[in-house]
Amino acid sequence: METRTGRLVVEKVGGKSTVTSCFSKYPIKFIIPNKGDSISCEFSIRDGCTTVLTTQASTKVYKSLGSKCSEQILEARIGSDAILAVIPDPVTCFSTARYSQKQIFRVVSDSSLVIVDWITSGRHESGEKWDFELYKSTNHIFLEGNQPLFLDTVLLEQGSNTSVSERMQDYQVIAMVILLGPKLKQIQNQVQENVRRMMSEQLYIPSNGLGHRGKTSSDCCLTKPTFIASCSVFGPKGIGVVVRIAAMTTESVYRFLHQQLASLEPLLGVSPYC
């Protein structure tokens, strides 16, 4: 009787060390990265159902081989009165990595959808900061009849004139949160109000009572915000809200997500990002 939970065989093939046999079962899993993995998943959330999609840790994208690009495609259909929450940990791209992901969601008028999509600058302990070659993330949401509801793409690519690191400056994380559907209306309102209050407090410049002529040179030296967030509505009758975030630390984004999405627990049966 096989009692092992894992077995791995490495042999020389074409002069290179190659995994020729790999077996693992829960609770372990061997990861043997290829320089350009391709993953494609399809989900169908039927009427009245609730589904939560998470990750065990950040999605790590390893160094690319030449022009090969790792890619991930997710397609999901969300039925009537159903909820899908896609709440992963961030993507972390290693130096020279190339990564592209595309997520397509098809909803009906009373579907509810939560999407968190975010990326860190890389492995700080290795001195990497926005050191990958390419990152592209596309999120499309369609209503019945293939009617576009939300179309968005984030593209970060090393340029000939400026690097991604130069463009991002001190910010180490960018994130996007989407809240869509009737079951999330109260949470949408809460998040919008919370973001408005956070930003007004953080960006508020107190008056020194001297008036315009009394300003000194030091008054013009504003501190760069460590966390920036903005909100906007989309779709007919404002059925969706999108939050965009830029932050200097991953911890601050985890904290924000936990605080703002905690109200989802009664709907999902779990509190996101505990």
Image (cartoon, rainbow, N blue to C red):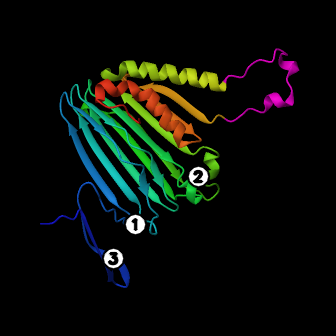
Residue 226, relative to residue 94: is it above or below? above
Which mark identifies residue 164? 2
Q: Residues within 10 Å of mark 2 (few under 14, many from 20)?
A: some
Picture quarter containing residue 71? bottom left
Q: Amino acid at mark 1?
A: Lys
Secondary structure of residue under mark 1? loop
The answer to whether 176 appears left or right of 160 in the picture is: left
Residue 99, relative to residue 208: is it above or below? below
Residue sitting at x 34%, y 62%: 31
Q: Amino acid at mark 2?
A: Val
Q: Quadrant of the N terminus?
A: bottom left
Looking at marks 3 and 1 on the same chain, the residue that comes earlier in the sequence is marked by 3
- CB atoms at circles 3 and 1 under 8 Å apart? no
Residue 142 location, x and y as percent? 31, 35
Residue 217, relative to residue 29: is it above or below? above
Where does label 3 land, which residue?
18
Q: Amino acid at mark 3?
A: Thr
Where does label 1 land, which residue?
35
Which mark identifies residue 263? none
Residue 240 visible in this rendered orientation of the protein: no
Residue 188, relative to residue 224: is it above or below? above
The secondary structure that most of the magenta stretch takes on is loop
Residue sitting at x 42%, y 49%: 58
* Magenta-colored span: 204-224
Task: Please tell me which residue lies in front, 171 or 262.
Answer: 262
